[in-house]
Image (cartoon, rainbow, N blue to C red):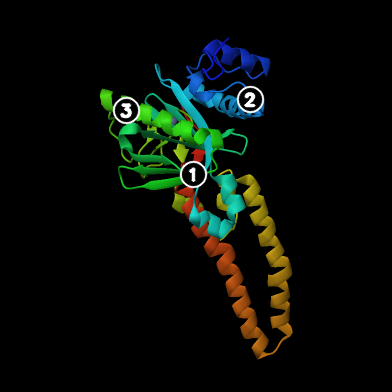
Amino acid sequence: MADENAPPTEEEILAKLSQLKLELNPEIPYHLQNLFPVLTGWFINGTIKNKATLIRALEPRLEEMLKPGEEVLYISKGVRNSLAAAFFMGALWANLLNQTAFILTNARLLMIRTNTTGTPQNNFWVIYYSEIQKFKGSWTGGMELRLKDGRSMSFSGFPKTDRKLMSECFETALHDYREKGFEPTTTQSMETLCAYCYETVPKEEFDCEACGATYWKPSQLALRSLIFPSWGDFLMGHTMLACFELLGYVAGLLFLVIPTILTMWSGRQGQVTAGVIVLAMYFFFAHVVDAIVTYSVARKGLHPRTGSTS
Ligand SMILES: [Zn+2]
């Protein structure tokens, strides 16, 4: 009788994926036993399906991003925690904007911003193992990442099954890197990658030298949000959030600004003063706060302005 607890072989995993109609791209070298360590048990098909669906959503980009000889050790998706975003936009929006796929390879950690189903959006990052000081998973599904240049990030919402496994894969990768001593030069611990050619776009630069693509500077986006709320979010491709912002702004104009102006028009001195305060607060929150939030969101990644020219 076969050992029930023995890890599945690659053939068994491939057979299971094909049975579930979730075949992966055979061109990409996956460490399948890390990704699908268990094939039997209650609700296991759901777990396998979630993982395979995420991987398949990432595959078109992975195929382009991976270098020759680069192997995929582990993949998972969590949410990058951002207090500022949650405070101003509400936890729900911050959650939607900060979905991040982690791809651990034998050379580096790739991060891709995705939508909730794992489809990549325009933000790509790389962190070489030599730049990581601490990578720690917690039992609540959180993940803490501390980098050599002092930056630290925290993530939440990783699936339960990934918490332990991802940390283990990471430890192995870190150990292997230390043995090989692969330490590329970087301009910052977490480098941003061009959304077209995946070459590094150095810190504080907004043009890709490799392919000619250009990116918005956070200040350019913030200025546009200051002039017209939601503009910056539209340019960053956060379309749904931007539409809600625009609706809220128009509703404010119709139901707060116009009635206030009419009251002031016909009113006495006291009403005029109150009206000025109401209008000042409305425009402060709608324009100034939106510009600040746009700036803080924009700084996290690169936002395409014009595409690649090569
Ligand atoms: Zn490029």
Please identify, in this view, whether the residue under mark 2 or under mark 1 is nearer the observer: 2
- Which quadrant of the view contains residue 106? top left
- Label 2: which residue? 41
* Residue appearing at x 62%, y 17% in the figure: 17
The x, y position of residue 281, in whole percent, is 58, 72
Is 260 in front, or is 176?
Answer: 176
The amino acid sitting under disc 1 is: Gly
* Residue appearing at x 55%, y 51% in the figure: 232
- Give me the C-alpha separation between circle 3 and circle 2: 32 Å
Please identify, in this view, whether the residue under mark 3 or under mark 2 is nearer the observer: 2
Regarding mark 2 in the picture, which secondary structure is present there?
Answer: loop
Task: Establish if 298 lies above or below 258.
Answer: above
The x, y position of residue 149, in whole percent, is 30, 45
- Label 3: which residue? 175
The amino acid sitting under disc 3 is: His
Is 225 in front, or is 182?
Answer: 182
Regarding mark 1 in the picture, which secondary structure is present there?
Answer: loop
- Label 1: which residue? 142
The x, y position of residue 130, in whole percent, is 30, 33
Placement of the N terminus among the 4 image quadrants: top right
